[in-house]
Amino acid sequence: MNMLTPAQLAAQYPVSRSTIYSACLSGLLAHYRVPAKKGKRGKYLIKLEDFTRWLEGNRRDATEPQDEEQLTYLT
């Protein structure tokens, strides 16, 4: 089982640590919360498969504009 921390994932993929933490806290990304000794913070551990599934689940396909009126040109 390949498990990584948010920092490790952020170093390998174009997603920030804060985005990964937010997805965990909001329940959108499955993760393990490993407790630490008293007075220290624990760790978030995420299966690589869960992360890539979450990332693919947020993929948006490009769409073709319906007509010229929908296009906005910057000058």
Image: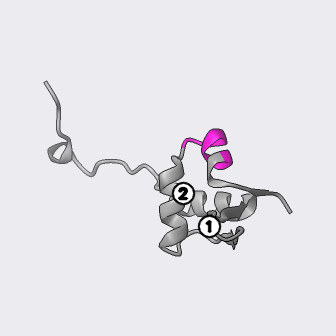
Q: Residues within 10 Å of mark 2 (few under 14, many from 20)?
A: many
The residue sitting at 65% across, 63% down in the picture is: 53
Mark 2, residue position: 20
Mark 1, residue position: 39
Residue 10 drawn in magenta: yes
Q: Position of residue 23 (x, y in %)?
A: 51, 65
Please tell me whether mark 2 or mark 1 is closer to you in this view: 1
| The one of 74 and 26 positioned closer to us in this rendering | 26
Q: Label 2 amino acid? A: Ile
Q: Is residue 47 visible?
A: yes
User: Up-down: is 48 above or below 11?
Assistant: below
The residue sitting at 63% across, 40% down in the picture is: 11
User: Up-down: is 56 above or below 32?
Assistant: above
Q: Position of residue 71 (x, y in %)?
A: 20, 42
- Left or right of 37? Residue 74 is left
Q: Label 1 amino acid? A: Gly
**Main SS, magenta residues:** helix
The residue sitting at 74% across, 61% down in the picture is: 49
User: Up-down: is 27 above or below 13?
Assistant: below
Q: Is residue 59 visible?
A: no
- Left or right of 4? Residue 11 is left
Q: SS at mark 2?
A: helix
Q: Quadrant of the C terminus?
A: top left
- Which residue occupies the extreme right position in the image? 1
Q: Residues within 10 Å of mark 1 (few under 14, many from 20)?
A: few
Q: Which residues are magenta?
A: 8-14
